[in-house]
Amino acid sequence: MSELVIKNLHVSIEDKEILKGVDLTVKQGDIHAIMGPNGTGKSTLAYTLMGHPSYTVTSGEIWFKGKNLLELAADERSRLGLFLAFQYPVSIPGVTVANFLRSAVNSRRRVANHEDKGMPILEFRKMLKEKMELLKMDPAFAGRYLNDGFSGGEKKRAEILQMATLKPEIAILDETDSGLDIDALRIVSEGVNALSGPDMGVLVITHYQRLLNYIKPQFVHIMLGGRIVESGGPDLALQLEERGYDWVREKYEEPATA
Amino acid sequence: MEEKPRVVVSRSRRSETPGKNFTFTAEMVPNSGSLAGYRQKAWQTFKRLSLPSMTEEAWRRTDLREIPAESVHLPTEGAFQKLAPIPSELLKPLTAHEHGGQVILLPGGARPTLSPELIRKGVIFTDLFTAEQENPELVARMVGQTVNPEEGKFAALAACLSQNGILLYIPKGVTVEQPLNSLLWGPGANLAFLSHILVWVDEGASVTYVHEAASPDENGPALHAGIVEIIVSDNASLRFVELQSWGRHVWNFSHERVRVGRNGNLDWIFGAIGSRLTKNFSELDLAGEGATGRMSGFYFTDGNQHLDHDTQQNHLAPHTTSDLLFKGALKGHSRSVWQGMIYVAVGATKTDGYQANRNLVLSPNARADSIPGLEILADDVRCTHGATVGKLEQEPLFYLKSRGIPDKEAERLLVEGFFDPIMQRIPFEGVRARFQQAIHEKTATQ
């Protein structure tokens, strides 16, 4: 079984330390949620796990399926079975959704087998059509330029479409609920729920509790000041919903020195 | 604190006129045939003009000091028989249809073919020597119509000594459905390929014409100098696709001008991936009221390639429309120059001119210069332009990589995406496929 293990992770961006010792283990099949106020390092954790070059790991370890992720580039991490649904997916004019996904699928096949000629076009189209139906997407979507002129909801749906196509073992959803109206939120969540299960573990990063009404985590963590300060079950999320983050701040933030 | 740029002077910017000389002699200029007079006059011009130097505005960014003038010679008759043969993919139709005609131009030879149906319709499509014999009056009438040998040393050279040429004539009112194709195949080192293309699409006629110049890489230098003269008469329509895939040893120069008559239409597509150095002058003269012209360019340089495209959109009559989009990508130590000008003559009111040049610099050692220009002498016109030089952005690259797409492949996708607006303008699968192949090959190398 795949397992993502994060040990005492310290991460800086431009010499400013953002993550100050994060420990977390996510197993394939489990759903974890990381909650926390803005600016506590949640997205930094997501980007660092995926290998964004702007984030420097100053100490700590990340292991996935027994491999040291810190030695792998982003594309290698992806092919190993890690996925990040971006909070702000970038637009790529000139590259269609279908062309992009086909490249992603074929890159996997080619690395596994150098002789591979890529997925036959008809098989690919059929597969893509099925995934798009699952997410209630218009088939014309496949011919549009990736994220170019997409609405907020379309971008998030496109992220989940990619997840459905690439079938990761661990998926990180970074603020996937931001910018979604309630209908889009339901469709996206249903998509995630259809994919999660024994084959896929999920790490949901969110500011608000509302996403967790749709995607039910077994484990909830609270992040503050670059650390995970509380861990618990689903109750913890409800507690945050009722009481906000102030009690967490009072409990863990060092009082300002006079 | 800002770091001071390191200044290294490796060579002086300005140069004197190259002192080298071509070895061509007056005896080489054909003294019979319908072009004899034209050629003799051009020879005088060639002798009189010196090689362009970087002190001239049009040549300010293109250095000819290394030009192999002394080492290139005219191919002898039948020379192609001992040189590399044409790769079969170059002979395949570049469009969905079979060719209506194809002319192969070779060092010291030519092979014209044209479908009997088009011959019956009065279409003429053949090599220049054959044309001089079979259609001497037409050739004499068309030559010098849009390009003057006085325009420069290379124009004069192509005019007086051209061995490879094309005559294409579409009679009044004839619509040619099947595209016509010509290929100038220039294998061999130390050779000079001199070409002269003449096209006349007569009133109300229409045609698609694809011309390709290509050669394998060779160990010694070679030179191509060419003239392209095209007339699109009133209400006529021409789609002209030019592909330049010379080997990396070729010094390539061309002077091209299309004149479009009243309500005529030109769709001009350039693709340039080859040569050691290219200096190309492409001009569009919108001479008749209501004439329209679109110029779409694609270039991708790498290694030490240097491509310099000089474009001019001349609005000489009212209600004329031009639209230019040139897009280029650069790798290695290569360099591109695009210099464009929209000119609107006195009285050419209600014209609409547009030019844009976009460059994607993929290597820190590559450089793109983009110089748009407008000269407007009429009132009530609309002229706009845009020029950009940019690098591959990191965020899209990371996004693609996060989906398992390796570096090279991600770069290729982004480059393809960059060129997509140009690809959309090319209605031929075969031409698009050729460009895609070039993108593949160029992005795969370091």
Image: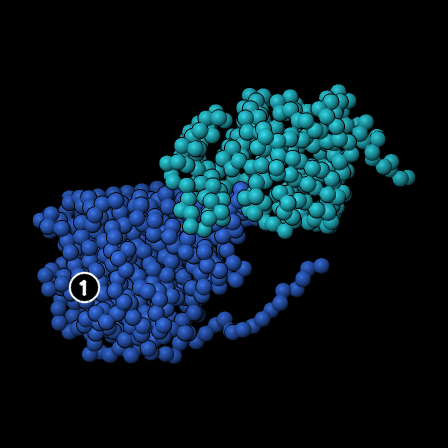
Q: For the point 45% across and 51% down, which residue is it?
A: A114
Report whether A253 appears left or right of B153: right
Which residue reaches farthest right? A258
In the rendered image, which quarter contains the N terminus of chain B?
bottom right
Q: Which chain is cyan?
A: A
Expressed as whole percent of the image width and height from the top left, the position of residue B143 reads: 20, 61
Q: Secondary structure at mark 1?
A: strand
Question: At which x and y percent is residue A220?
Answer: 71, 29
Residue B225 is drawn in which quadrant? bottom left
Is the residue B113 above or below the residue A100 in the image?
below
Q: Quadrant of residue A229?
A: top right
Which residue is at the front of the view, B283 or B111? Answer: B111
Which residue is at a point 54% across and 59% down the rendered structure image?
B364
Residue at horizontal 74 percent and vertical 40 percent from the top:
A22
Q: Is residue B37 above or below residue B181?
A: below
Pointer 1: what residue? B110
Please state which amino acid type lies under the numbered disc 1: Ala
Q: Quadrant of residue A40?
A: top right
A105 w.r.t. B287: above or below:
above
* Residue A238 can be seen in this image: yes
Compared across the picture, whether A113 is left or right of B96 comes to right
The shade of chain B is blue
In the rendered image, the residue lying farthest to the front is A1
Q: Residue at x 45, y 55 (%)?
A: B443
Confirm whether residue B377 shows in the render: no
**Colour scheme of the rendered structure:** by chain
